[in-house]
Image (cartoon, rainbow, N blue to C red):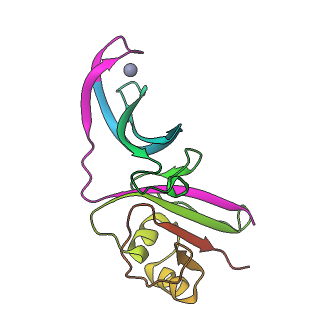
Amino acid sequence: MQTQQYSLLLIKNQKADTVKKQCKMCGKVTIFTDTTIRRHNANGKNIYQFAIYKCLKNHSWNKKLDIYKSFTNHVDPATLVPSEFKPIAEGEKISLSLSDHESYEINITGADGSFRLDRTLADHIEGWSRTEIAQRIKSGTILLNNRLTKPSQKLAVHDKISIIIKK
Ligand SMILES: [Zn+2]
């Protein structure tokens, strides 16, 4: 089965974080804005989380956020999001089409606030109403961490939402 994998960072009342710093590409001090895209890179036993910032001319800067020690901090590296996952931007809606993939996975890379499963999916999936999503959750074609759940379930970091498209 072909699965398209996405990552989603949930932030309430989002105000873009900015940092003033030297841009090597611009050759001067400029303002970098947090794109809210997060990446994880492994280096030996450590896993680093980076925030991707962009300057006014769109040059990237990776701000190091956290270091997870694979074994000491109870973080299972398998639950972290590989960089090849496609990030869903704030306000973006993805379209799920059967011709491309049979199933979809959305990995929650952060949840700053309270987010319901059904509301979050309605906010990010093109053409699916919250009622339709609630029905899919009840019928088990939308799973949370491979289990049946309820539409009002709150999302947390490292949650995995699976969406199976019925033929
Ligand atoms: Zn720049």
Ligand number 1: quarter of image: top left
129 or 85, nearer to the observer: 85
Residue 74: percent from the left, percent from the top? 42, 57
Q: Residue at point 26% right, 40% down?
A: 17
Verify whether residue 14 appears in magenta. yes
**Could you tell me what secondary structure mostly forms the magenta stretch?**
strand
| Quarter assignment of residue 5 | bottom right
Residue 59 can be seen, yes or no: yes
Q: Residue at point 50% right, 41% down?
A: 45
Extent of the magenta region = 1-30
Verify whether residue 84 appears in magenta. no
Residue 135, compared with residue 143, is above or below; it is below
Q: Quadrant of the N terminus?
A: bottom right
Give the left or right position of residue 12, taking residue 85 as reference. left
Give the left or right position of residue 66, taking residue 42 as reference. left
65 or 142, nearer to the observer: 65
Residue 82, compared with residue 110, is above or below; it is above
| Quarter assignment of residue 3 | bottom right
Q: Residue at point 59% right, 46% down?
A: 84
Residue 103, compared with residue 79, is above or below; it is below
* Callout count: 0
| Quarter assignment of residue 140 | bottom right
Residue 69: percent from the left, percent from the top? 43, 45
66 or 14, nearer to the observer: 66
Q: Quadrant of the C terminus?
A: bottom right
Give the left or right position of residue 162, taking residue 18 as reference. right
Residue extending farthest to the top is: 27
Residue 34: percent from the left, percent from the top? 33, 39
Residue 96 can be seen, yes or no: no
Residue 75: percent from the left, percent from the top? 44, 55
